[in-house]
Image: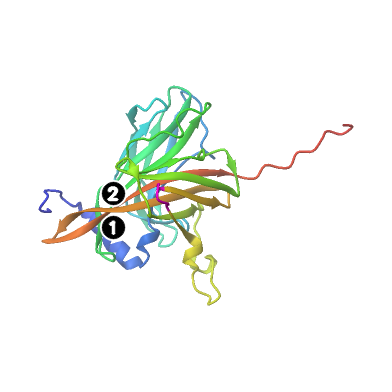
Amino acid sequence: MSKSGYRIPAMVMALAAALAFSGAALAHFHTYWPKVEGCYGKPGEQVTWQYFWGHPFEMIIYDAVEPKFFVAGPDGKKEPASVQAVKLKDPESGQERQAYEVSYKPGAVGDYYLCLEAQPYFIPEEKVFWQDFVKEPWHVMAEKGWDQKVGLEVEIVPLTRPYGWPVGSVFQGQALFQGKPLKGATVEIEKFNGFFVPADKLPKDRFGEENTPLITRTVKTDAQGYLACTLDSPGWWVIAVGQRHGQKTRQGQAYPVDKRGYLWVYVEPAPAPLAPAAGN
């Protein structure tokens, strides 16, 4: 129990130990994606997302502590989502890991966001607590609400619609902390491949070492919190920004808290070139 009265769950401590062992804490993200391709649905059709905690690029899965999930609708109203504990096998270790499935049935057309607020957890390698806030779009037949603020403490508000763009498109957004522009902040961008990528298949630099800057890309926000990046392959991409704010106490010692806000964006495959019909 910390001095603030917040009890750190045992699974969080186990997760933190796994981070310290992995040696690559900064590549960890809350990863979730719908069990259908893309992010398009219809009113009254239930959508189910799979969720894990780990490395999206390599699809390395660690035990997850259940976050708080909710859905922000196109009218700005927040509704609960149904959450079920499941097991996902980590392809690297072969071990079953704690994960979750999240379900929701939109009742009207418009753009929805499945949002996540995670508990703070201690990262021994970094000597810091992390607290994460995440959102991911679900488009239901009408463009309404994709540019909304959903009220996360750290949030990326898209200026580019976060779906319906082909490979190679430039994404633009604004990072906010407590509703105000987050200037000069580091932004990390990483692709979720959706399958296991072993170490020998990872991008390499000229020394034959893992090319981590290519896997987890980095940009900075400007003085008004604006950011831009190019997304160069189809599928889901995470864009994450952080702000150090406050402290938490662990075992009698105070540590800083890094609050991270993510936006997941879906990139379409390039459409086939059109050609005139025969005889035209």
Span shown in magenta: 221-225
The amino acid marked with disc number 1 is Leu
Q: Residue furthest bottom?
A: 207
Which residue is drawn at the image coordinates 28% and 64% (left, top)?
Answer: 126
Residue 101, position in %: x, y? 38, 40
Q: Earlier in the sequence, mark 1 or mark 2?
A: 1
Q: Residue at x 39, y 34 (%)?
A: 103
Q: Which residue is mark 1?
A: 15
Marks 1 and 2: CB-CB under 8 Å? yes
Q: Is residue 175 left or right of residue 10?
A: right
Instruction: Residue at the far front: name it.
Output: 223
Q: Is residue 278 left or right of residue 113?
A: right
Q: Residues within 10 Å of mark 1 (few under 14, many from 20)?
A: many
Which residue in the rendered view is the most extreme toward the right? Answer: 279
The x, y position of residue 18, in whole percent, is 31, 62
Q: State the residue in front, 88 or 176.
A: 176
Report which residue position mark 2 lands on.
Answer: 65
Q: Amino acid at mark 2?
A: Val
**Would you say residue 55 is visible in this rendering?**
no
Q: Main secondary structure of the magenta part?
A: loop
Label 2 secondary element:
loop
Quadrant of the rendered image containing residue 279: top right
Q: Residue at x 45, y 35 (%)?
A: 147
Say above or below: 4 vs 253. Answer: above
CA separation in Å, label 1 and label 2: 8 Å
